Amino acid sequence: MAEVILRQVEKEYSNGFKAVHGIDLTIKEGEFMVFVGPSGCAKSTTLRMIAGLEDITTGEVIIGDKCVNHLPPKDRGISMVFQNYALYPHMSVYENMAFGLRQQKLDKLEIERRINEAAETLEITQLLANKPGEMSGGQRQRVALGRAMVRKPDVFLFDEPLSNLDAKLRVSTRISIAQLHQDLKSEGQNATMIYVTHDQVEAMTLGDRICVLNQGKIMQVDTPMNLYHSPANKFVAGFIGSPAMNLIRATLVKESTHVYTQLACGTRFLLPHEKAQKVSHKIGQQVWFGMRPEHISEATKNSLENATDNLALTRINVIESMGNEIYLYCKLGDDKIISRCPFNPNDSMKHGEDHYMKFDMSHCHLFDIETELALLH
């Protein structure tokens, strides 16, 4: 297996549109890297440049210790799993999986051994005689995975492989891909995998690290937990997490020794001392104030009696019950906020009612109003 290095990789089309802006990224050997971002962020274009399916305008793609810019896909040591499976409809599962191996001139016994091993791992042994049209979407995607596995590539590339599946199949196939990565590692194969998705749940559950892209630029590369808890900028903060982080314009104000974030409606929240120190140079200026939905909760009787600074009177517009938790869509002045609370069968909250909500300021985020970079790192 091999590491993959992108050095100042750019993609500009003949009409002058620049899709990828000087990407620098090192994907370690055996790492599961996920490219995630909104539609049009160039995550698939970047993957296709690694695969050799898209020309590079400038920069280098290095797989192992070799620059592969001018190598055709078949010579790059990669296998790719596509969104639409890309199986030959007139061939059986066995023939689909064997096709690439025969092109490599492997002997019949080796081909049979590899296919049987992959089929057993992916639990598709009973389907080897079937044709793609006789199988479900999830089964076809497993065949596409098997076809990639048997080639024993240096790098696996996945281009939104689950987007055509229903919700239940997406979960089971996602688990299969994660299990495949772990199984290959336990067998001594450091399987380097690069996975493209717009689904952040896939990104958060699969990736060793995640590369967040927007408009052809890298916004942040980090572990799933670091992206969630320490976003480097407002874009990552708003993109990673479901429901999304609440982001509201606020002004930093100081009274005596205390620093507050003050919203347009006049509501203010006390910043913890260590956070206040980091933004002392922004006093009197506007910032983006961020708070994850799970850090906004219904105020308890005790907190109301103590009249803490971090309460806000909100109006509940919508209540969504998710079974073990509820999402509260509230209005705070002219701003909209989302709260994520544990389900309480004794709770009597109703649509259109006013309720005090408590903001846990130990978990707040602040971003520069112009650069949108995090201020509390």
Image (cartoon, rainbow, N blue to C red):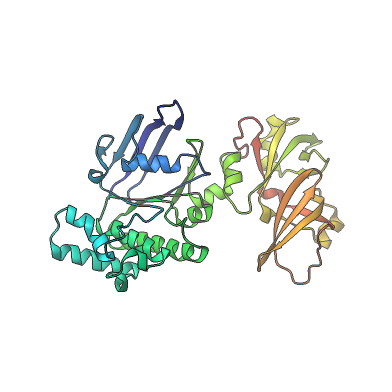
Q: Is residue 279 above or below residue 230?
A: above
Number of marks: 0
Closer-to-camera residue (71/277): 71
Please tell me in which quadrant of the rendered image residue 269 appears: top right
Which residue is depicted at the point 48% across and 35% down?
Answer: 217
Which residue is depicted at the point 78% across and 71% down?
Answer: 346
Residue 310 can be seen in this image: no
Closer-to-camera residue (339/282): 339
Residue 53 percent coordinates (x, y): 33, 41
Which residue reaches farthest bottom? 126
Which residue is depicted at the point 58% across and 39% down?
Answer: 233
Relative side of 223 to 140, left or right: right
Q: Is residue 210 above or below residue 108?
A: above
Residue 265 percent coordinates (x, y): 82, 41
- Quadrant housing the C terminus: top right
Q: Is residue 145 above or below residue 286?
A: below
Relative side of 351 to 320, left or right: right
Residue 228 can be seen in this image: yes
Relative side of 263 to 100, left or right: right
Relative side of 29 to 264, left or right: left
Q: Is residue 43 above or below residue 357?
A: above
Please tell me in which quadrant of the rendered image residue 230 appears: top right
Residue 140 percent coordinates (x, y): 37, 63
Which residue reaches farthest top? 16
Closer-to-camera residue (40/234): 40
Residue 2 percent coordinates (x, y): 28, 47
